[in-house]
Image (cartoon, rainbow, N blue to C red):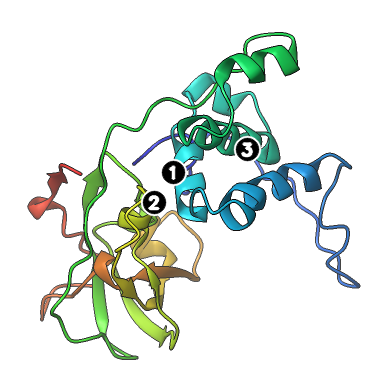
């Protein structure tokens, strides 16, 4: 689904504040409470086995736009985990409200049942030119909006396979396992000639990709065939 969480390539937000620590990756968390938010997610996913990490990601996507804009990264995972724990019957809305002393706003209900992976195709190989399927789905999807319909080159295919996010993100434990591909895109093919020279590498599941049509220019988006997907 497309929402506030997927802002890659969107203009008007100014420079992104960031810091690079060349000595260490620590501290992982910037505030003391953040590790508790992270732990809550794995309490539900691993210890209790009530949901998957992809379902947590989908719940983050379901957070109402204004609430999403007014919260920080780990706050969203508290909201998402709490939402799933309520939906799974581990805790109630009333218990959350009582603990908070006010109404705890959960994420919106899911509006999609997800979709299965594409199967029966030969895997892509390193060096293949591929195009990202230009799909807009109502449910969870892990293909960033800014690469959909764009062509890139496969740099790597993982040996490990994982459940297709669009299925497991909706609780489908029978989701087909697929490899992911490191696909390299030219920056100008994504954002036009006003962009700087360079490349962007995106990790994409197999079902998000097709072989690029022979003879089609790299920068030409495959948008005329766009079809909304009822997921």
Q: Nearer the viewer, mark 3 or mark 1?
A: 1
The residue nearer to you, when weighing 158 against 37, is 37
Mark 3 and mark 1 lie on one chain; the one further toward the N terminus is 3
The kind of secondary structure element at disc 2 is loop
Residue at mark 3 to residue at mark 2: CA–CA distance: 32 Å
Which mark is drawn over residue 6? Answer: none
* Labels 3 and 1 touching (C-beta < 8 A): no
Mark 2 and mark 1 lie on one chain; the one further toward the N terminus is 1
Residue beneath label 2, please? Answer: 169
* Labels 3 and 2 touching (C-beta < 8 A): no
Residue at 13% in and 73% down: 216
Quadrant containing the N terminus in the rendered view: top left
Give above or below for 190 relative to 80: below
Residue 209: give x, y in percent of width and height: 25, 70
The residue nearer to you, when weighing 146 against 100, is 100
Which mark is drawn over residue 58? Answer: 1
Residue at mark 3 to residue at mark 1: CA–CA distance: 27 Å
Badge 3, how many Cα within 10 Å: few under 14, some, many 20+? few
The kind of secondary structure element at disc 3 is loop
* Labels 2 and 1 touching (C-beta < 8 A): yes
Residue at 25% in and 76% down: 130
Quadrant containing the C terminus in the rendered view: top left
Give above or below for 42 relative to 154: above
Residue beneath label 3, please? Answer: 14
Residue at 22% in and 52% down: 115
In the figure, is residue 23 to the left or right of 114? Answer: right
């Amino acid at each position: 689904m497309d929402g506030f969480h997927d802002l890659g390539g969107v203009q008007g937000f100014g420079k992104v504040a960031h810091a690079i620590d060349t000595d260490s990756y620590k501290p992982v968390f910037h505030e003391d409470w953040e590790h508790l938010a992270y732990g809550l997610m794995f309490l539900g996913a691993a210890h209790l086995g009530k949901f998957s990490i992809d379902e947590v990601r989908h719940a983050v996507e379901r957070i109402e736009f204004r609430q999403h804009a007014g919260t920080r990264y780990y706050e969203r995972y508290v909201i998402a985990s709490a939402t799933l724990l309520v939906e799974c019957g581990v805790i109630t809305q009333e218990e959350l409200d009582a603990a908070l002393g006010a109404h705890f706003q959960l994420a919106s209900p899911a509006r999609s049942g997800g979709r299965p992976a594409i199967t029966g195709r030969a895997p892509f190989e390193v060096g293949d030119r591929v195009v990202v399927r230009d799909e807009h789905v109502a449910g969870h999807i892990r293909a960033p909006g800014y690469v959909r319909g764009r062509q890139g080159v496969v740099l790597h295919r993982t040996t490990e396979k994982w459940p297709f996010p669009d299925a497991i993100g909706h609780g489908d434990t029978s989701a087909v396992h697929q490899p992911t591909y490191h696909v390299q895109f030219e920056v100008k093919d994504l954002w036009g000639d006003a962009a700087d020279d360079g490349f962007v590498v995106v990790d994409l599941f197999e079902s998000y990709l097709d072989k690029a049509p022979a003879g089609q220019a790299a920068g030409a988006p495959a948008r005329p065939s766009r079809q909304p997907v009822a997921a």
